[in-house]
Image (cartoon, grey):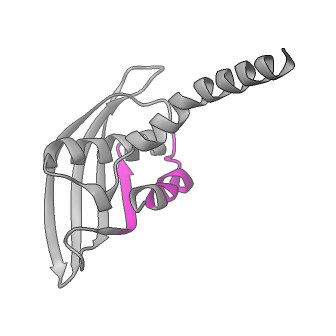
Amino acid sequence: MTRLRSAGVTGLVVLALLPLARAADDEPSFKKRGDQEKQFVTLVGEAIVKAAHGTAKKTALLEYAYKEPKPNRTELTLKMEYYGAVVGKRYVADIVVKIDSTDKNAWEVLNIDYADTNTAIKQNEKKIQELIKKFNR
């Protein structure tokens, strides 16, 4: 009977942690970009805006472009919009994701530059830079 309860509790713990594991898998990876480019770029932009401003609402991709400043380097430039949670004001973010594109099937993010029109609340630079590890998994 004790073993049965223990197994039941373990099962509940595993079920409770499943959404957390799934959430981590939902983050975009530059090593597994896939074929749906606009969808991937939108997810990248949303992740960066959410890292910069945790309370951002209604994020949307306005435009994006790839540039190759030099061999084996690519820059993904994004223009995103989001709305503040409290006031509901619209903000625009300019993002540059600097990428080592030596291996065309497994890009590696080197840095993320972020700036937006929100002068009331400063972006969380630490969380933005922490995304680099997640994007490179």
Q: Looking at the image, which is closer to me, 115 or 10?
A: 10
Q: Is residue 118 above or below residue 76?
A: above
Q: Where is 133 relative to 58, above or below?
A: below
Is residue 128 highlighted in magenta?
A: yes
Q: Nearer the viewer, residue 37 or 10?
A: 10
Is residue 80 at all visible to an observer of this figure? yes
Query: Where 29 falls versus 120 (above or below)?
Result: below
- Corner quadrant of residue 13: top right
Task: Report the front residue among 19 and 1.
Answer: 1
Provide residue 35's location: percent of width, then percent of height: 13, 51
Q: Position of residue 4 (x, y in %)?
A: 77, 18
Residue beneath the point at 44% across and 61% down: 132
Q: In this rendering, does residue 53 appear at all?
A: no
- Residue 61 is one of the magenta-drawn residues: no
**Magenta residues (range):** 109-132
Instruction: Describe residue 13's horizontal placement relative to residue 80 as left or right.
Output: right
Residue at coordinates 23% horizontally, 46% vertically from top-left?
40
Residue 18's x, y, as percent? 54, 30
Residue for point 38% across, 62% down: 112
Viewed as shown, does residue 102 lie left or right of 7?
Answer: left
Image quadrant in which you'd find residue 31: bottom left
At x 22% / y 68%, what residue is drawn? Answer: 105
Quadrant in the picture for the N terminus: top right
